[in-house]
Image: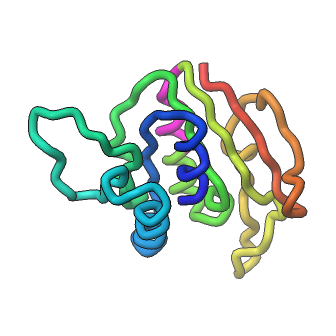
Amino acid sequence: GYTCHYLQQLINTKYTVYDLPFSSIMQAIYLMISIGENNVHLDNEELPKNKSTSKKIFIKPYWKIFDHKIKKNILWFNEDSIPEIDIDLSKKYVKKILKSKKSYFLSINQEARNDYGKGIKQHTVSDLLKTNSIYRTRDFLRPGYIEELFKIS
């Protein structure tokens, strides 16, 4: 939620957050307190009919990303999750993201390749994307984390 909070102050546009239900509740509380209840839309909450909404941040459960209508010119952002979830689900996310042409994907994730247990190592975002990043740098706050920006053509 803090990423949307700061981005919303920089750029007046709409954001959609896809996350685990419990995390989504915590993000909603934080965002409603910091930017106001009228700016946050929770999944399954009714929007006014035939009116443009003033909502700026939409919070949805992670599985709803697969219902996201493909558009151009999107900034996809992922932090602290792709390497930590099942590789098959990660591949589905990346496939969905790569369908939005003329877009960008910003990833801030670890590359420690930690053991899930049972000898299975975590994957990295670079393992899943077969394209070069526009830039790649170490995260200055957390050792083992990489910030990468990918252009989706």
- Does 96 lie within the magenta span? yes
The image shows residue 108, relative to residue 110, as above or below, that is above
Q: Compared to 36, does 16 lie above or below?
A: above
Q: Residue at x 89, y 54 (%)?
A: 140
Dominant SS type (magenta) = helix
Q: Is residue 151 above or below residue 87?
A: above
Colour option used: rainbow
* Residue located at (60% from left, 18% from top): 153
Q: Quadrant of residue 7?
A: top right
Q: Quadrant of residue 136?
A: top right
Residue at the image point whose x is 22% and y is 33% from the top:
52
Residue 7 located left or right of residue 137: left
Up-down relation of residue 96 to residue 145 (above or below):
above
Quick one: 79 or 14, which is closer to the camera?
Answer: 14
Residue plotted at (49% across, 67% down): 30
Residue 32 image position (x, y, % from top left): 41, 62
Q: Where are the magenta residues, as a range?
A: 94-101
Residue at the far bottom: name it. Answer: 118
Residue 27 percent coordinates (x, y): 48, 65
